[in-house]
Amino acid sequence: MEAFEHLRRGDARVRVVGYGILAAMLVLLGGLWYVQIAGSQEYRSRIRQQTFRSVRVPAVRGKIKDRAGVVLADNRPSYNLVLYIEELRPLFDAEYTRLRAGRRLSPAEQSALRLNARYQVARRILDNLGRIIGTPIELGERELHRHHNQWPYRPLPLLENLSPEQVARFLEPAAVLPGVDLEVLPLRHYPQGTMAAHVLGYLTRDDMARGDEELSFNYSLPTYQGAVGIEAGYDEDLRGRPGLKSVVVDSLCYRESETVWNAAEPGRNVVLALDAGLQDATATALATLGKFVRGAAVVMDVANGDVLALVSTPAFDPNEFLAPISAQRWDEWMNNPLFRPIFNRATQGAYPPGSIFKVVTALGCFDSGVLTFASLTNQFDNPGYFRLGRRTIDDTAPAGEYDFRRAFKRSSNTYFIHYGLEAGRDAILRAGHQFFLGEGAGLQTRQEVSGYFPEADEAKRRWSTGNLANVCIGQEITVTPLQMAVMTAAVANGGSVWWPRLVRQIEPAEPGLGQETTEIAPRLRGELDANRQFLAILREAMLADTEEEGGTAFLAFHASDRRTPLLERYRVGGKTGTAEVERAGRVVDKIVWFASFGPYESPRYAVVVMVEGGGSGGATCAPVARRIFAYIEETEASSGGGGQRLAWNQ
């Protein structure tokens, strides 16, 4: 009331302020009248012409890196054209009305006509789109209807990985088409190609929403999930958390606004124990056997179980899985038993170990007391075969006198069958189970088998004397190359059996995101209940296999003069093996091995090589292992210490 008194008394300053407030209120009331009454029809029309999309946006997938930070799996932007079918419903209805043109149709005919109208509208849009970007857009009628009926919550992909020229053509003002949009999404990229493909695995398309996610959006942009390998085992860490955005699109398909409700949270990075340089060198060494070699190689740190290299060949390029794979390509991969590039021979292949199992047989014989320190030098008469009833088992070692060292380096079947049968089934079983044969290695890759090594009850039922004789020389049981690497590492380090470690840590995608780094420590699985002095004698016998004339791996580690070692500094201990695969009483394949460790004086690396259809462990696999050790030797000697490539000419 006092304010009005001031106005009446003619206070000029107060009167000016009062008139200003009154004018502002009149302007505000006028604006409200225009928006709510005069312009209401215009705004109602605009709202009817707008489309609101709530879109689930996939997160950027975390990287996979080697132990030194070399990126093995990354992301790059992908420009994709998509079609929002539900936004074309008014056009579908208009086309249906035009085609029907007053005709009287049965319900079935009406349904068929609606489907035809839908396809005709979509086909015209896609034909125009194809002319604009200069690339025909293929879309079958059945594919359109299936997508419309089954996945209405996600846009229909039309063309992925557009070139810059195609993107520029689409973004021309004249290129606006109803329901068509350009989405920019992160796409997985494997910069090293086939290298470490079996460890990394591959992705498959996963556009399905799960749980509460389905209730929070209208559309889901394409995303991927891990199928096998690290991509699968650590998918939850790598994929991150999807985001949610709202997009307003007008009748001409222009984006009017975009609001991010929940930003996508990028996935965490997975850091492997692999060394990229050693992985590449191992694959290169295997490739020296020929283009179509079928095999695997594993390099393990004997001190903690780190898998430094894991190679299976032939390999595949995981980049191929990011686009639809043709039926012909898939058939080539899956139905050729001699090819199978997706099959991880290092962890999924279960093979008879052949004579590398004599390491286990020797431990069982010593543990049982059949072999003692005193008897290791006793001479055993080997006639060149072992007679078991009416059956004769040939010996690849020549006839003659053998002590333990000579029998091991020349891989005498007769010697190890003789003492293995004396030791008995339980001793051999006990020795094998100390290496956890017949059990999984704890990988999270969906690519692992446990091989076959029975428990005592099953062996009692199934192992006759003849079966046990076969087992003593590595037949009738199966192992994976990774299991043999674990076995070799345990012998080399003095008896510690480690779980294989593929992943060292899981780290934030970027600093400051509030994510924690998860360290994955090495895990000791068990200790060999074996005499440490005998383990040292076993390592000496493995050294004799590569350094002494007559050793099955001697030629692989020496020049043609038989005197000059091919490794300058490393002394390597190893054991060769050859196993036969029989079907219907016929030998149909040979599996050859070389299990090794080095350097002999202070073991750090276990290297196991396996080849399907090879000639022999000494001639086929041992040269591959020597090349791997040569790379390690040269890398350690180089001043930078970081992965200098060798010339593979030895």
Image (cartoon, grey):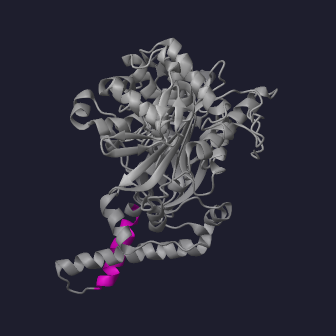
Query: In this picture, which residue range is highlighted in magenta?
Result: 87-101
Which residue occupies the foreground of this view, 179 or 315?
A: 315
Vertical side of 73 occupied by 642: above or below: above
Taking the spot 78% from the left edge, 27% from the top edge, the residue there is 637
Q: Would you say residue 268 sits in the magenta stretch?
A: no
Taking 123 as reference, is 318 above or below it? above
Residue 374: percent from left, percent from top? 49, 13
Residue 521 in picture, x, y percent from top left: 50, 19
User: Vertically, is 202 above or below 401?
Assistant: below
Q: Who's the residue at 24% across and 87% down the image?
A: 103
Looking at the rendered structure, the number of numbered marks drawn on it comes to 0
What residue occupies the far right of the structure in this picture?
A: 639
Res 38 seen here: no
Quadrant in which the C terminus is drawn: top right
Q: Is residue 49 left or right of residue 149?
A: right
Q: Position of residue 258 (x, y in %)?
A: 51, 46
In this rendered view, identify the residue nearer to me: 158 or 96: 158
Res 286 visible:
yes
Q: Could you tell me residue 356's position as x and y percent?
A: 49, 35
Relative to the observer, which residue lies in front, 130 or 519?
519
Q: Is residue 294 left or right of residue 120?
A: right
The image quarter in which residue 448 lies: top left
Q: Quadrant of the N terminus?
A: top left
Relative horizontal placement of residue 637, taking residue 360 as reference (left or right): right
Q: Main secondary structure of the magenta part?
A: helix
Seen as rendered, the residue at the extreme left is 106
Identified at 52% across, 12% down, the residue is 533
Closest to the observer: 4 or 409?
A: 409
